[in-house]
Amino acid sequence: MDQDIGGAIVALRKHGFDSLPPLGIVLGSGLGPLADEAAGAVAVAYVELPGFPVPSVEGHAGRLVVGAIEGRRVALFQGRGHYYERGDPNAMRVAIDTFQSLGGKSLLLTNAAGGLRTEWRPPSLVAITDHINFSGTNPLIGHAGADRFVPLTRAYDPSLIETLHRAARASNVELHEGVYMWFCGPSFETPAEIRAARTLGADLVGMSTVPEVILARRAGLRVAAVSVVTNYAAGLEGGDPSHDETQEYARLAADRFKRLLRAFIREAP
Ligand code: HPA
């Protein structure tokens, strides 16, 4: 079931890319505009890259933008594919494998999430330290070969988490730490599911990122992830999340989040 990255590589070559920078960032809700701030940027629409996801979610542009931020070339994935769009946990496989194959080494994933800690007022920022995948699915199901047995003990690279905290201090941004639990969506969780998630040890809930982490670790990339808490999770502190609320709070956090990312780009190995 290996999805072929050959078509995407040929298409990128036509756009002048024989390689990609070592640092990639997947820009989640509200963060897309960071790509417009990249200097000397070249953008390629996902529709031109065979196997890349064509996002159907408002606010997700669907472009790979390569340009300089803080004087450093980065690959910005402006928009992502989600499992809930087509029921495909491999929505980001070709994008991730292509990045790795053309020189990518580290991938920073960003997302919007519901918060399970009452002390995290939306829109707080949280570095993900670990995840819970009780969704019943996994992008590596059906994948043949011993490399399907991907260790996830330190999936979120401890030294990149340290870099995130350094970046937070340098940019004067408060950054918490927490465990992210993946819910496949697209409906939001019930209050009972959120109570269960809390009991299981989750601090955040969201509909993305986890399949990407698994795919990226299989590809041998170093991974870090940051959530913007756009809302209290369902039933918590009156939490009653909606798409509009998540979009609005993601936008409210955008400037602070961008400051953190710029500092991370400066500090990253
Ligand atoms: N649940 C799941 N995904 C989310 C949430 C939430 O409360 N907020 C933003 N993305």
Image (cartoon, helix red, strand yellow):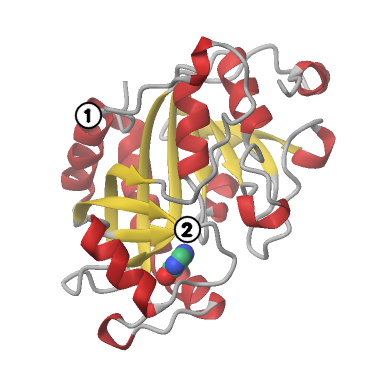
According to the picture, the residue beneath numbered tag 2 turns out to be 183
Tell me which residue sits at (58%, 35%) in the image. Answer: 139
In this rendering, the answer to whether 185 lies above or below 76 is below
Q: Amino acid at mark 2?
A: Phe
Q: Does the numbered disc 1 mark a residue whose Cβ is under 8 Å from ligand 1?
A: no
User: Which residue is rendered at x = 75% and y = 39% of the image?
Assistant: 46
Residue 93 can be seen in this image: yes
Q: Is mark 2 within 8 Å of ligand 1?
A: yes
Q: Secondary structure at mark 1?
A: helix
* Pointer 1 local density, CA inside 10 Å: few below 14, some 14–19, many at least 20: some
Image x and y of residue 89, in percent: 61, 42
Marks 2/1 in contact by CB < 8 Å: the verdict is: no
Residue placed most toward the observer, 26 or 257: 26
Residue that mark 1 sits on: 158
Q: Earlier in the sequence, mark 2 or mark 1?
A: 1
Res. 77 image quadrant? top right
